[in-house]
Image (cartoon, grey):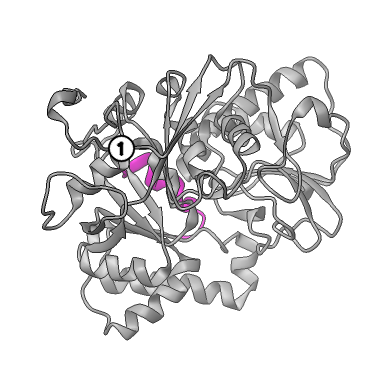
Amino acid sequence: MTSTPKSRRAHPMTLTQKILAQHAVSLPRPWVERGDMLQIRVDWTIASELAWNGMDRTYTLLGRPSIADPAHFYLALDHTVDPVTLANDARTRKLADLSRAFARESGIRHFYDANVTIMHTRFYRDLVQPGEVVIGADSHTSSHGGLGAVAIGLGGADVTAAMVLGQTWLEVPEAIAIEYAGELGFGIGGKDVILHTLGLLGRNTVAMERSVEYRGAAAAHFSTDMRFTICNMTAEFGGLNGIFEPNEPVAAWLARRRGYNDAARYFRADDDAPYVAHYPIALGELAPQVARPFSPDNVFDVSALAGQPLDGAFIGACTTTEEELALAGLMLEVALADGAQPTEMPAERRIVVPGDLLIDANLRKHGLWEVYQRAGFTVDVPNCSMCLGIASRKAGKGEVWLSSQNRNFENRMGEGSLAWL
């Protein structure tokens, strides 16, 4: 992880630029600049059953050719497949069956059927490596920058073409640097950090269509789960991609994998990389953060909102990591031991959904699901659940829900719902 001496480095690059340059086809010079149009090799293409519905039409128009690498197309059923909807909704079954048929036809290695994982969770935990390029048919593909990959969400037709060709075209984006400083207090996680960032800088402003590189002394110590959450909500920030420099915590994470840990490339930005702006953010006094409806940048310290009546609580969605689920479970355990009693609320209004069956098994093994259940939560199987407002469970009109998802737009959790992040 050494950088080139400045005297020899006539063309410094950002982290994203270095990865794109390494993946460029027939690059006429050993560097790239913002605005360059590149033909690049793609390491992974990823999609959900909801995206595959449109992608399959494009694939048919292309003549259903062989795909570039069946081992590096990843397809997971997660958006619409809560068990009740899957059992009772014909459109949902059609979406699932369309994905299953393609998986059989193409022989892809990484197909995950309903209620096994949320799309981004398994891919991040088991497959993506630093220095790779990932193109996904979902805006939260940005999540995978947490491990130091360039991960970009594009439209279904673009992802289908990349799946078939193993390549795509990208314009090198402008980049901004978010410089985190200070030591986080106990229990302050990645969700607090990114909500605070959104509250300070605004949604779809300084990050819009740019590469967002998360840096600084504090960022170097963030866990891989924290990095995932921050990069996940780069989509709400407005960025084309979000990315952290992979360092020791990432290397330690990869070392525990049984596979997909041998192709990592540990790029880092040059000291004088051409960022269009630097934004220093102090984290030492950061309190838990909450975003009120109807925007993820409508952010307040939780103390300013204490006493707000709630109609429900949802813990889940691709934003929410194992680390956060475990910490919340431990805090619930202490609260219950201290005599706290759950407020009266129907079981279907207090829901927790793990992102993957492996997380589910781990929390069950350590007794944390039993703690959630004693606190009145219903533990569901992996799926996007309430995050999209299209599953069997929805928030009702005028209902206030506290949610760990990433978006709180109007009607996001159901028509007329009020989501507080």
Q: Position of residue 376 (x, y in %)?
A: 77, 37
Taking the spot 53% from the left edge, 15% from the top edge, the residue there is: 182
Give the mark count.
1
Task: Return the residue nearer the eye: 139 or 78.
Answer: 139
Query: Which class describes the residues within 10 Å of circle 1: few (<14), some (14-19), or many (20+)?
Result: many
Q: Position of residue 410 (x, y in %)?
A: 74, 58
Q: Does the image show residue 98? A: no
Is residue 80 found left or right of 262 in the rendered image? Answer: right
Q: Secondary structure at mark 1?
A: loop
Task: Return the residue nearer the eye: 131 or 331.
Answer: 131
**Residue 342 to residue 104: above or below:** above
**Residue 148 to residue 82: above or below:** above
Taking the spot 25% from the left edge, 48% from the top edge, the residue there is: 20
Residue 413 occupies which quadrant of the picture?
Answer: bottom right
Q: Is residue 120 magenta?
A: yes
Residue 339 occupies which quadrant of the picture?
Answer: top right
Q: Does the image show residue 139? A: yes
Taking the spot 57% from the left edge, 27% from the top edge, the residue there is: 189
Q: Position of residue 40 (x, y in %)?
A: 22, 57
Residue 38 occupies which quadrant of the picture?
Answer: bottom left
Task: Read off the residue under disc 1.
Answer: 14
**Residue 171 to residue 361: above or below:** below
Q: Which residues are magenta?
A: 113-128
Taking the spot 61% from the left edge, 29% from the top edge, the residue there is: 368
Is residue 385 found left or right of 129 in the rendered image? Answer: right
Q: Is residue 41 magenta?
A: no
The C terminus - image quarter: top right
The N terminus - image quarter: top left
Q: Position of residue 379 (x, y in %)?
A: 65, 43
Amino acid type, callout 1:
Thr
Is residue 364 found left or right of 48 in the rendered image? Answer: right
